[in-house]
Image (cartoon, rainbow, N blue to C red):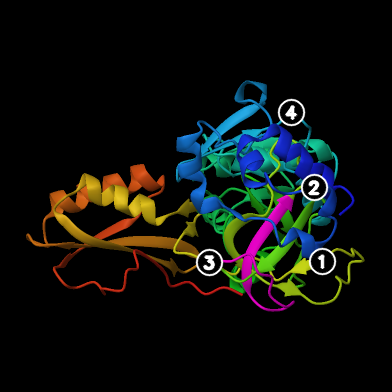
Amino acid sequence: MAALPLQIAHAKTHAPQFARLLADVDPTGVTNREALTRLPVTRKSDMPEMQNAIPPLGGLSAIKPGAAARLFASPGPLYEPEGLSPDYWRTARALFAAGFRPGDIVHNSFSYHLTPGGWILDMGLRALGCAVVPAGVGNSEAQAQTIAQYRPVGYTGTPDYLLILLDAADELGLDYSSIVKAMVSGGALYPSLRQDYAARGISVLQCYATAELGLIAYESLPDEGMIVDEHLIVEIVRPGTGDPVPDGEVGEVIVTTLNPDYPLIRFATGDLSAVQPGLSTCGRTNTRLRGWLGRADQTTKVKGMFIRPEQIAAILRRHPTVARARLVVSRLGETDVMTLFCEVAEDIGDTALTAAISDTLRKVCKIKGGVSLEPTGALLNDGKVIEDTRTYG
């Protein structure tokens, strides 16, 4: 809280969007949570519009694009800068809590292509003194062979992709027994999946991070909640508002970051969580969250990638014969799957149209999904274009 007035003043001075949003705010008076709740909320869902109006970063960044270390483009599309500070996303703390130590070789299967996922963990690992195998996603057989060759002790990536790599190694007769710990993010770590890994001798903890904010919270022990990172102020509010809810009640996660390069003030993530009462038995004393409990809006996350209603609309614009569509996200075993159900007036057995929509789905959402053509009137008329049938908690 002592740093908060300085950060608000910094944002007003160096980030044009916050200069406008906070024009009437006296930073010296914002010294506690009650005062913070009176500031306006900036929503992640509004970022595409802001970035179109003030390209490329929407006036939210305090550094110019040319002064950044890297510039990213995430699905949405959303554009994010990376500043010059080491461990810019502050993930070394979470990795240390998960047992990673200097000298460890770590296989990093987060994507390095346009999105910052790979770099978020890569920089934390390097700050901790680990050697990183920049594997990225895809080509699981080659990744399994690399694991057998380098013998990494750790894995970072989405929760379910590690299982794909282990199964690929089994099929190829390769040894993956060197991996004994993992830090996962970008999706839900289901209890059954954690137990599966434990049976294979792998201890798995998870962290909660975003491209805009970096690390938000992290596990130090299984099933004890996630400890909030010390460089953030986290609020849990009633979805669609900026009004805090009581501890324990599920609400939307709003974050104020102390990052001087990207000084986001009351940034509404669209994610749901709740404060978990009490302190962690590991000895860390910051507030805990129950973890990621889903989305406050129809946006959802599949295999580490956000899928938004605007993307489904973009698919429909490319295929005018589709009257309505609904993306259903579910689980098949321990893997996330998605299927786009499309109402069409023509033959629902049109394989060429199915293939064309499937290709568009992959291009727009950056991951593969199934397509099912349905007759007119088959989909519920409830305004929902993304339905997430997975369970969280």
As helix, strand or loop, the secondary structure at mark 2 comes to helix
Q: In the rendered structure, which amino acid carries the disc numbered 4? A: Leu
Marks 3 and 2, the one that precedes in the sequence = 2
Reading the image, the residue beneath label 2 is: 27
Are circles 2 and 4 on residues that touch, CB within 8 Å? no
Q: In the rendered structure, which amino acid carries the disc numbered 2? A: Pro
Q: In the rendered structure, which amino acid carries the disc numbered 1? A: Thr
- In the rendering, at what x and y percent does residue 108 appear? 64, 43
Q: How far apart are marks 2 and 4 (CA)?
A: 26 Å
- In the rendering, at what x and y percent does residue 106 appear? 71, 43
Of badges 2 and 4, nearer the viewer stands 2
Marks 1 and 2, the one that precedes in the sequence = 2
Q: In the rendered structure, which amino acid carries the disc numbered 3? A: Ala
Are circles 3 and 4 on residues that touch, CB within 8 Å? no
Reading the image, the residue beneath label 4 is: 84
Q: In which quarter of the image is the C terminus?
A: bottom right
As helix, strand or loop, the secondary structure at mark 1 comes to loop
Give the vertical position of 181 relative to 190 (above or below): above
Reading the image, the residue beneath label 3 is: 296
Q: Distance between the residues labelled 1 and 4?
A: 28 Å
Q: Give the range drawn in magenta.
A: 240-256
Reading the image, the residue beneath label 1 is: 287
Examine the image and state in which quarter residue 372 appears.
bottom left
The residue sitting at 62% across, 33% down in the picture is 81
